[in-house]
Amino acid sequence: MSAILSPMRLCRNPIRTRLFSSHFGAKLNRVVPSLTRLVSGQGPSLTRIASQSTSSSNPSVSSEKEAALAAASTPTDSPTIFDKIINKEIPANVVYEDEKVLAFRDINPQAPVHILIIPKVKDGLIRLAKAEERHFDILGRLLYTAKVIAKQEGLEEGFRIVINDGPKGCQSVYHIHVHLLGGRQMEWPAG
């Protein structure tokens, strides 16, 4: 979920704006008025927004990097959007669930198959860099679950696993999660 918060991606889904505003608060609210104008047809075109979001000359347009930095400033004990999904406060298209993990389709997929796999209990594991020996079992469980889901999704030809870590790794939700991407030829480097 870390690579899904640019205005270009948010503006395609006004529901996403509402969902993430509870997590990112005032930081996201800076872009909501322009997103609302865009969705209502009163704002600039998607093409213009896309070009601005990749341009460093327009500081008013948030980027994935800024979203990651905003998320990094959120207190680590704050509930995340993933906690709300686990608690069924926010709907998700669940593809796998057991007593330890939950997996659901990303609402803005970066590949034909894009599934997020999260532990149901955070246990201080907000990012991979914070992992401790006690997290050994859940980290293995996340990767094994990715393999099970890949098979379930028909990704026998291959798939990609991504874990974004910290603000420089563009992590935008501080609840460790694995991205399972597949269904197309992946590029190198990640893209």
Image (cartoon, grey):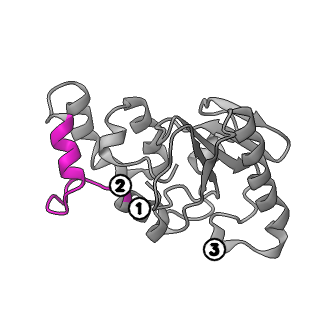
Residue 122 seen in the figure: yes
Q: What whole-number distance in Å separates the C-alpha atoms at marks 1 and 2?
A: 7 Å
- At x 49%, y 38%, the residue is 109
Q: What whole-number distance in Å separates the C-alpha atoms at marks 3 and 1?
A: 18 Å
The mark found on residue 129 in the picture is: 3
Magenta residues? 46-64
Q: Is residue 53 covered in magenta? A: yes
Tell me the element at label 2.
Answer: helix
Name the residue at the front extreme.
157
Q: Amino acid at mark 1?
A: Ala
Q: Nearer the viewer, mark 3 or mark 1?
A: 3
The mark found on residue 27 in the picture is: 2
Q: What whole-number distance in Å separates the C-alpha atoms at marks 2 and 3?
A: 25 Å
**Residue at image mark 1:** 70
Q: Quadrant of the C terminus?
A: bottom left
Percent position (x, y) of residue 145? 77, 47
Q: Where on the picture, by quarter, is residue 78?
A: bottom right
Q: Amino acid at mark 2?
A: Lys
The mark found on residue 42 in the picture is: none
In the image shown, does 68 or 81 lie closer to the viewer?
A: 68
Q: Is residue 156 left or right of residue 56?
A: right
Which of the marked residues, 3 or 1, is nearer the chain's N terminus?
A: 1
Q: Tell me whether circle 1 and circle 2 mark residues in contact (CB < 8 Å).
A: yes
